[in-house]
Image (tube, rainbow, N blue to C red):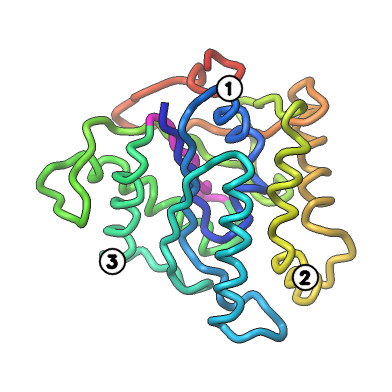
Amino acid sequence: MNILAIGAHPDDIEVQCAGTLARYAAAGHKVFMAVATNGNVGSPTLSREEIANVRHAEQQASCAIIGAELIWMDFDDEWLMNDRPTRTRFIDAIRQADPDVMFIHGPTDYHPDHRISGQVAEDARIPASVRLVETALPHISKIPHVFYMDNPAGVGFEPEVYVDTTEVFETKRQMLLCHQSQDSWMRAIYGEHTSITDMMTDNSKARGLAGGYAHAEGFREVKTYPRTGTFAMLPGFGV
């Protein structure tokens, strides 16, 4: 299968579903990681262009760990909008990946870029398969099945299913460690006393406790027409 995760910022995918992606990759599935914004405001010292280049390189390094293909949409950080250019670019990201399964941000996330990214991705899943919706890439033949990823720290998100990520947890941690500039930025702007990897680990353990594993990631199914799949498409539930 082809698997596509769409995150608003560099590191979002790693925090919320890199373990699941690592399991797909290990099983021989093709994984794509699409990042909507370039992180170009996330530095207390670097220019917008400089930090965007750093974030791009960090994302490439993370993708390389599991052999994922990066789709870099390059929108401005904090200014993601639900408009025609954005939807068009998201449609092309879906068309490029031609996914069977897609992971997106959910509607209860705290960050507007996250919520908008998820909404645009959800709205683009059907147009990506429509021939007369003309973009840079041709239409695809199937509509992907979609799951919402967890929210940061699990706040406001109640999973329906848990994927056991115990055996790939170290891979997930190494992917997130690629994003050192984000770790520095979060400490600078939020005054965090723990690293993003520590925060991720805490949530991973909490989801694991709920699911009966040492580490887990939680998901919800997007139950919209047409229904194109089931939880069996997740690793450990049939894949």
Residue 239 is inside the magenta segment? no
Q: Which residue is mark 2?
A: 184
Which residue sits at x=17%, y=41%?
130
Residue 116 in picture, x, y percent from top left: 45, 59
Kind of residue at disc 3:
Pro
CA–CA distance in space, label 3 to label 2: 31 Å
Residue 129 in picture, x, y percent from top left: 22, 39
Residue 207 sits in quarter: top right
Determine whether 208 is above or below 113 in the image.
above
Sequence order check, earlier mark of 3 and 2: 3
Sequence order check, earlier mark of 1 and 3: 3
Which residue sits at x=64%, y=43%?
65
Determine crowd level at label 1: few under 14, some 14-19, many 20+ residues with C-alpha closer than 10 A.
Answer: some
26 with respect to 99 (left or right): right
Kind of residue at disc 1:
Pro
Asked which secondary structure carries label 3, the reply is: helix
Sequence order check, earlier mark of 1 and 2: 2
Residue 2 in picture, x, y percent from top left: 41, 32
Determine crowd level at label 2: few under 14, some 14-19, many 20+ residues with C-alpha closer than 10 A.
Answer: some
Determine crowd level at label 3: few under 14, some 14-19, many 20+ residues with C-alpha closer than 10 A.
Answer: few
Residue 107 is inside the magenta segment? yes
Q: Nearer the viewer, residue 109 or 80?
A: 80
Disc assigned to residue 42: none
Residue stretch in magenta: 100-108
- Say which of marks 3 and 2 sits in front: 2
Which residue sits at x=31%, y=48%?
124
Determine whether 120 is above or below 49 in the image.
above
Disc assigned to residue 85: 3
Determine whether 144 is above or below 125 in the image.
above
Q: Which residue is mark 1?
A: 235
Q: Nearer the viewer, residue 127 or 35?
A: 35
